[in-house]
Amino acid sequence: MQNFTLLGTVDVLPLQLDLQRHPELWNQHTGRTAHEGSPHAQVSDIWLRWRPEEQLKEAANYNEPFAEFCWYPAMAQLPSVRRILMDTMTRIGGTALGGTLITRIPPGCQVKPHTDQDGWHASYYRTKVYCVIRTNPRAVNITGGEAYTPNVGDVFSFDNLLTHAVINDGDTDRVTMMMALRAD
């Protein structure tokens, strides 16, 4: 693989069960998915860590530099997330954790091709890591023209400053946890 790096696999069953117990967590924050022209319009999110919500008054606030991150309330209801985050940070020598969220792409939906080049966050937290929580053989990640079909439990990184997309042509949801890290 040229544009993807498999970092290992983890047991995601505890997180699958946490998510099953808390369906109300989906789409409590739609800042990434609801704006016009969003490549993420067909996606549902659970925000775990990001800029404090009271600082997100305008669309520009999502891409401007900021120093303060906070844990969103969903983190307390998904206790198995912490182990995956800490294990991933340790494994890759992470020095700082940025934005973290869980995304769900329903069957027949997609994240449209886009790049994160214009965002301060993506440039500063250069290591983008996915942990696959639920998937199917027809859910495909595409980065820099290369396709990759990960398995449940795979933890992988890719360069989100390249054009990337996800297509779910399967008959089940594709669910991943996304972590933005610095690994200096």
Image: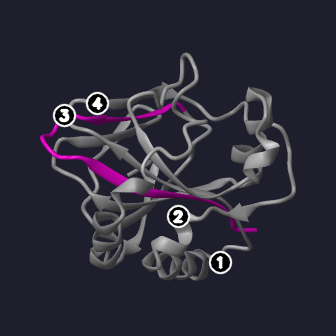
Depth check: give the residue in front, 157 or 169.
Answer: 169
How far, Cα to Cα, is label 3 from label 2? Answer: 28 Å
Q: Nearer the viewer, mark 1 or mark 4?
A: 4
How far from the left and from the top, in percent, is residue 180? 62, 57
Residue receiving disc 2: 74
**Which label sits on residue 169?**
3
How far, Cα to Cα, is label 2 from label 1? Answer: 26 Å
Considering the image in quadrants, where does the C terminus appear? bottom right
- Looking at the image, residue 51 sits to the left or right of residue 103; the answer is right
- Looking at the image, residue 50 sits to the left or right of residue 124; the answer is left
Question: Regarding mark 1 in the picture, which secondary structure is present there?
Answer: loop
Residue receiving disc 4: 109
* Dot 4 amino acid type: Cys
Q: Pick whichever of labels 1 and 4 is earlier in the sequence.
A: 1
Q: Pick whichever of labels 4 and 2 is earlier in the sequence.
A: 2
Q: Residue furthest top?
A: 36
At x 49%, y 26%, the residue is 39
Q: Nearer the viewer, mark 2 or mark 1?
A: 2
Q: Residue furthest front?
A: 24
Numbered label tally: 4
Pointer 3 with pointer 2, Cβ within 8 A? no
Q: Is residue 63 visible?
A: no
Q: Pick whichever of labels 2 and 1 is earlier in the sequence.
A: 2
Question: Regarding mark 2 in the picture, which secondary structure is present there?
Answer: helix
The quarter holding residue 75 reads bottom right
At x 79%, y 29%, the residue is 60
Crowding near the residue tagged with mark 3, few <14, some 14–19, many ≥20 C-alpha atoms within 10 Å: some
Residue receiving disc 1: 93
